[in-house]
Image (cartoon, rainbow, N blue to C red):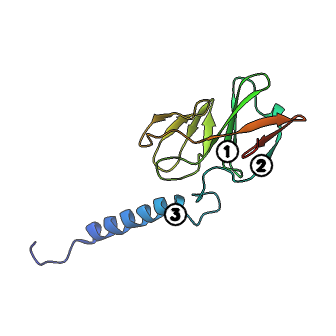
Amino acid sequence: MSGLPAPRRTVLKGVALAGAAGLGLAACSTDSKLGHAQTPTPTAPVDLGAAADVPVGGAKLYREQRLVVSCPAQGEYKAFSAQCTHAGCLLEKLEGTVGDCPCHGSRFDVTTGKAIQGPATEPLPEVPVRAEGGKLVAGPDA
């Protein structure tokens, strides 16, 4: 290095990159309301509402409950944690039956839980789910 101060442009680029990195960290923060959870699956039964809200052949993301539920056939349901197995971020949206993680681009088949695009390699944890009186209940004893 020459001992001369860095050009202003170089310094500003570094500041911008550091700020952007901080934003990425905040998006995956353990302090965020819907970010990481110590336990990615429910520890008690969770009422998800009407079973009819999950279309046959499709899926529904329940962000507040950190779950994703698919319906492969009428009256048949499968549930998985909606917390990415790579860094713990919450899936942001579904494209058909594919769940997208906003933090690092992992994608999951929400009918099987399988990671279909990395960096995640582990599947989403399966969660017991049942239809009861037209409503879905997920978690232990479901």
Q: Is residue 33 left or right of residue 84?
A: right
- Provide residue 1's location: percent of width, then percent of height: 10, 72
At a point 88% along the width and 34% down the height, the residue shown is 134
Mark 3 or 1, nearer chain start: 3
Q: Are marks 1 and 2 in contact (CB under 8 Å)?
A: yes
Q: Nearer the viewer, residue 91 or 75?
A: 75
At a point 60% along the width and 56% down the height, the residue shown is 39
Distance Cα–Cα, label 1 vs label 2 = 10 Å
Residue that protrudes farthest toward the front in the picture: 141
Question: Disc 2 marks which residue?
Answer: 46
Question: Disc 3 marks which residue?
Answer: 26
Q: Amino acid at mark 2?
A: Val
Count neighbours of disc 2 (C-alpha within 10 A) and say few if under 14, some if 14 to 19, many if 20 or more: some
Question: Disc 1 marks which residue?
Answer: 67
Q: Nearer the viewer, residue 140 or 78?
A: 140
Q: Amino acid at mark 3?
A: Ala
Q: Helix, strand, or loop for circle 3?
A: helix
Q: Helix, strand, or loop for circle 1?
A: strand
Q: Is residue 81 left or right of residue 56?
A: left
